[in-house]
Image: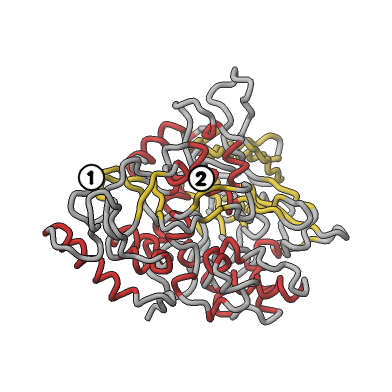
Amino acid sequence: MREAPPSGHIRSDCGAVRLCLVFCLLGTTVACQSESPEEPAVKVLTQAQLMDPATCQGCHPKHFEEWSGSMHAYASIDPVFLAMNQRAQRQTGGDIGDFCVKCHAPVAVALGLTEDGLNLESVPDYAQGVTCFACHSVDGISQLHNNGLVLATDGVLRGGIKDPVENPAHASAYSPHLDREALHPSSDLCGSCHDIVNGHGVHLERTYAEWNASLYAKEDPAGQQSCGQCHTRGRDDVAAEYPGVPIRRVHNHQMVGVDVALTDFPQKAQQRARIQRELSFSLASLLCVRSTDGMNDIEVALENIGVGHSWPSGATFDRRAWVELVAYDESGQVIFESGVVGDDEPLRELDDPQLWELGSRGFDADGRPTNDFWDIVRLESEVLPAPTAFSMLDPDYTDIHRRKFYRFAGAVPAAVSLRVLIRPLGLDVLDELIHEGDLDPAYRALIPTFELGFTQVEWFAEDGDECVPVGHQDFYDTGRDQRGTP
C-alpha cells in the first residue's frame, strides 16, 4: 500500500478528481468550478497530492505505468545505490551528506524527509525515486551537474505541450525544459543529474558534457538530437485521459539506459529487452585478419554511431565493458582469445595482457586504484566518443574510430569471432560492497551481461576477405526497422 502525503488520501482524491471532471462537463457546480466566469477555476489537487505519482496515475495511466518500471522510479530503492551510499557515509564520516540522495530522491531531500539517504527505507513512497513532480515542477536550473534543478511550489505542473488543456486537477504550463524538441533547455534538465562532479573537482559522470560536445548538440537540424529524442521516444496519443484532450506527440517515460532493476520490480523483463535493443544499435565494428611469416595480426575497429554521448557513459568507473575476440584453427580449436570472461568472473581479475576494456579507472590521492567515487582524484578513461561532425572537412571533425591490434604467433586462423559486452556494474564493485556487509551477496548473480548486437562479427578464411565490417547502411536500415522513429 502506497503511503500518501500527509495532506490527504491519494486514492480517494483520485476518485474525487475523476468525479469532478464528470460534474464539470455536466455543468454542475462543484469545487472545481469557479464562482464567476472571471475567476480562475479552483484546482482539486493540493501541492502535497501533486507530489505523489499515484495521483498522476488517475489521468495519466500510460505515463505512470511506463515511469513505474523505470530506473527513475527505482533510483532510491536500488539495493546497490543504498549500499554505495551507506559505504560512502561510513567512510567519510557523514561528510558526503546528500551528495547521492539529492539526485536519487530529490523530492525527499526537498521536503526534508532525508538528509543523507540512510533512512530511505522509512521515507514514504510518494517521495521515493525521481518522481513525476521532480521533473514536471522544474522552474529553473542553477547548475549543470549534481542536481541543479530548481523546483517550483506554485502548484503548476510543467510539460512540453505549448497549449495544455485547461483542467480542474492542476494548473498546467509549457516549459522548454520538458519539451524534447527544445534542444538545449530539455537536455539541460537531464544533464543536471547526469553530470556528476565530486568533492575533488573530478568530473565523474560526463554524459551531458559528452552530448554537448557532439554534433547532436549543434543547431544544425540535420544532426541535432536532444536527450529526450533518444531516451523518451515519442508516440501519437493523448497526454491525459480527459475529455477534449487532442491526440498529440507524447513521449515514453521508460527512459532506459543500461542500468537494470535487480529486485522484484514492475516490467523487469520489458526493461531488459528495451536496454538490449538500444545497446544493439550503439556501436559498429570492423574485423580484419592478416597473417604473414608465422605471425597473425588481428585488427578490431569500433565506432560509436548510435549514441548521443560517449560509450560507455555515466559512472564509467563502475561499469565494465570490453571486447571479446576468439580465433580458431581448422579443427575448431581455440588458438587465441582475449576478453573471454566467465559469467561469475570479475573482468578485472582476468589475466589477459591484451584485454581491450572500455570505460574508466579511478585513482585516489596516493595513486591507488579505487571504485570509491568520493576518493577519486583522477580518472583514466578510454571510451568511444560521439561524432562531432558529418564531414571530415568540417573544422569540428574528430576521428571517432578506435582501433586495437592483437598479435600472436602460430597457426593461421581459420575463423575469428568478435563481440563487445557490457555489465552495468562490475562484479568487483559488488564484491567490495558485499565484503563490507553493505550488500546482500544474492544480488551479485543478478547483474546481466549485455552483448552489443552490431559488434558481433565472424570472419572465415574460406571467404577470402581480409576484413569484415558491419556497414553503416546495414546499421541504419536495421535500426530504423527495429527501433522505430523518435
Q: Is residue 143 above or below residue 398?
A: below
Residue 200 vs residue 134, the one in the foreground: 134
Residue 106 vs residue 230, the one in the foreground: 106
Instruction: State the residue at coordinates (52%, 34%).
Output: 216
Q: Is residue 417 above or below residue 263?
A: above
Q: Which residue is mark 2?
A: 455
- Asked whether the viewer can see residue 287, the reply is no
In the image: residue 454, left or right of residue 147: left
Residue 196 vs residue 459, the one in the foreground: 196
- Asked whether the viewer can see residue 341, the reply is yes
* Numbered tag placed on residue 129 in the rendering: none
Give the class, few, some or many, for how many residues have Cα within 10 Å of label 2's Cα (few <14, many ≥20): many
In the image: residue 365, left or right of residue 146: right
Which mark is nearer the camera, 2 or 1?
Answer: 1
Q: Which residue is mark 1?
A: 247
State the image coordinates of residue 290 (x, y, percent, origin top left). Answer: 63, 35
